[in-house]
Image (cartoon, rainbow, N blue to C red):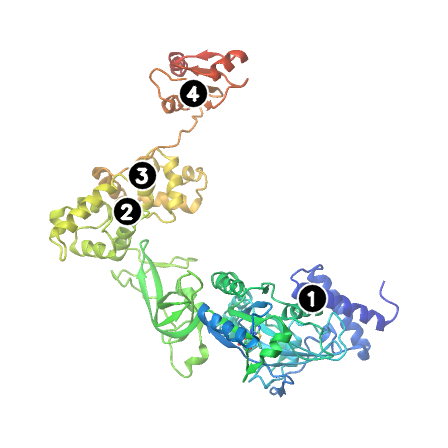
Amino acid sequence: MPDSTPHKRAAALRELLDRYNEEYHVRDAPTVSDAEYDALIRELRALENAHPDLRTPDSPTQRVGAKPSEGFLPHEHSVPMLSLGNAFGADELRAWHTRLTRQLDGEPNAYTAELKIDGLAVSLRYRDGVFESGATRGDGVVGEDVTPNLRTVRSIPLRLRVPHEGVLEVRGEVYMRRSDFDRLNESRVAQGEPPFANPRNSAAGSLRQLDPAMTAQRPLRFFAYGIGANQPALRATTQWDLLAALDGFGFPVNKEARRFASFDEVVAFCDEWEGKRSTLDYGTDGVVVKVDSLAQQRDLGAVGREPRWAVAFKYPPEEVTTTLRSIEVNVGRTGSVNPYAVLEPVQVGGVMVSMATLHNEDYIHAKDIREGDVVTVRRAGEVIPEIVGPLVAARKGKQLPVYHLPARCPVCGTPVQRAEGEAMAYCPNAVCPAQIIERLAHFASRGAMDIEGLGYRSAISFVEAGFVNDVGDIYSLTADRLLTLPRTGEKSAANLVAAIERSKARPFARVLYALGIRFVGFQTAQLLADAVSDIDALASMSAQELQATEQIGPSIAESVVSFFAQPANRAIVEKLRTAGVTLRGQPRPRTATDGPLVGKTLVLTGTLPSLSREEATALITSAGGKVAGSVSKKTDYVVAGEAAGTKLSKAESLGVPVIDEGALRKLVERA
Ligand code: IVH
């Protein structure tokens, strides 16, 4: 039942809406549906429309609605927003620590270590607990007043959860999550707008929109990490308490922050996050290490704009900008035409990068990447470098044509094909030298046939010399022929021939993998090898039969069928067979579904006169029977040989029939 007076009802609604907002945007733990929230905000809006005097500046209805402005007014920070000195690497971090220890005449009591969020710093001013104004950092002394825009950021409370009579300035970072950024860029591209280069630029651009309605549509978030003016002064005595107080006021505080008593732990924290930061959904460019005690912070003071009590431990950037010199393509083993970027070499994530994958033509168009662009390159952890996007603003009047994949295979000149609905384009020429080389290199690679000495370079020379047209031809290479190639000595020729010889003994699963059948990776090859007796059995299976095999889906099945349907591939199999390559597996013993022993369980004990344990097991399972390890009432027969042990006596006590090898053979042959 709504409260009796509009005034009371409005107050109750605001309180509810504030709570739900905080649960959703600050704590990531909503307790009501979006629909319920929307219904309440509609009710409040209607109330405020009917009674305009009820409309307070901290009302949840006031997040959006301010009119576009002509520009931002300067905002002078009453307490300057300091910047931080940098420490690159553990040595510089320790040097910082040594300096302040000397100045304090001893070690600080404790430290906080906070992830350095890669966004933009803002200062939020609350008067009597109500959000009053907010500004960007600017040069630290004067920033820009972006109050209406900050109001739209849902994780910034419009009213503090704990009352604070007087002034409180809260400082922190406005940022955008990577996932939100990706989604935003996708929709921008879909609407024909240029994508943003990275989450940071996107957050900065969004916060500086003249129309707050635009900012409201951008997924901005906030983390609080400090305070500016505070009157009456907050009671916190440490940075750690301060973070707890900010949390209590209803601000999002990054949950990875830690307090450490020893400096070694701080160093370990920095180290740990270097590897882990790429797993976060927001960008970080380091760790901010702070002396925990606010009294010790005061003692240490600042040099210019940089406090002595804090330092930014910086990671090598995972994202940098560079020039995209050109887009080239290579042709893969399946004939896929793969575009890649040739970059002005740059250091990113600690390594030199001069190439980045571009996946396919649609990817290039979606990101609007053009040759000659300045692009953002990203490399997170061990991930292959990729292009995040172009800096469209850097094009300035340059005419950069939209990229198109070449119409013909750059290696053999065959027209490139792209099937309806497929992302990749292919060179359909199965004997395209580029494909042959890729297939050879794959065939000879480590996890496949492991032919030492057969890498890309030799693959190219074999194809160029006309010695090899497919992987089957590898086995007709002789030392004499190899010696006719440039830069090939007796020793290396002999070594290669020996390595090729050794490869014939690789297990069947590896041969299947080495053939490079589309979608057949190492795991799948193993599954297939387990399922069939030999390659001929596999080659004669229908897609339906293949799909009956565990974990084999329609794409793999189709791919296997189409591989063996091609005469060229059947010819390869024949070459491998002639060479003596392993083309049959050791199928795991499988229970036959018919035979004289179907439904029967047998137990083996002792040494049989002519059958090994494995042979006896194979004999039983091929007749449809099962072999169990121990005797029970459910056992149908115990097959006993020389020196049978407790299983025999157990069988006798349970009345289970005991037979010898001869009787077993008779049972099986009865069929
Ligand atoms: S403290 C005096 N804590 O880093 C201390 N800054 O280079 C002032 N930043 O402008 C900043 N995360 O934009 C602090 N947990 C954190 C931070 C952080 C990101 C940014 C902030 C500041 C810049 C300093």
Asked if the residue under mark 4 is in contact with the one under mark 2, i.e. CB atoms within 8 Å, the reply is no
Q: Quadrant of residue 307?
A: bottom right
The quadrant of the picture occupied by the C terminus is: top left
Task: Indicate which disc residue 22 carries.
Answer: 1
Check disc 2 and report the residue beneath it.
450
Q: Is residue 634 above or below residue 175?
A: above
Separation of residues labelled 2 and 4 (CA atoms): 41 Å
Question: Which quadrant of the picture is home to ligand 1?
Answer: bottom right
Question: Could you classify mark 1 by the number of other residues whose Cα lies within 10 Å: few (under 14), some (14-19), or many (20 or more)?
Answer: many
In the rendered image, the quadrant that contains the N terminus is bottom right
Pick whichever, 368 or 140, lies toward us. Answer: 140
Q: Secondary structure at mark 3?
A: loop
Of 233 and 26, nearer the camera is 233
- Report, in whole angstroms, how far the alpha carbon at label 2 lies from the one at label 3: 11 Å
Tag 4, which secondary structure?
Answer: loop
Label 3 crowd (10 A; few <14 / some 14-19 / many >=20):
some
* Marks 2,3: beta carbons within 8 A: no
Give the vertical position of 540 relative to 98 (above or below): above
The one of 192 and 155 positioned closer to us in this rendering: 155
For disc 4, the marked residue is: 595
Q: Are marks 1 and 4 in contact (CB under 8 Å)?
A: no
Residue indicated by mark 3: 507
**Mark 4 neighbour class, 10 Å CA radius: few under 14, some 14 to 19, many 20 or more:** some
Q: Of the residues under marks 4 and 3, which one precedes in the sequence?
A: 3
Which residue is outermost to the right? 4
Q: x, y (%) of residue 66?
A: 68, 80
- Identified at 41% across, 84% down, the residue is 397
Check disc 1 and give the amino acid type.
Glu
Query: Of callouts 1 and 3, which one flags the residue occurring earlier in the amino acid sequence?
Result: 1
Label disc, if present, on residue 157 of the rendered structure: none
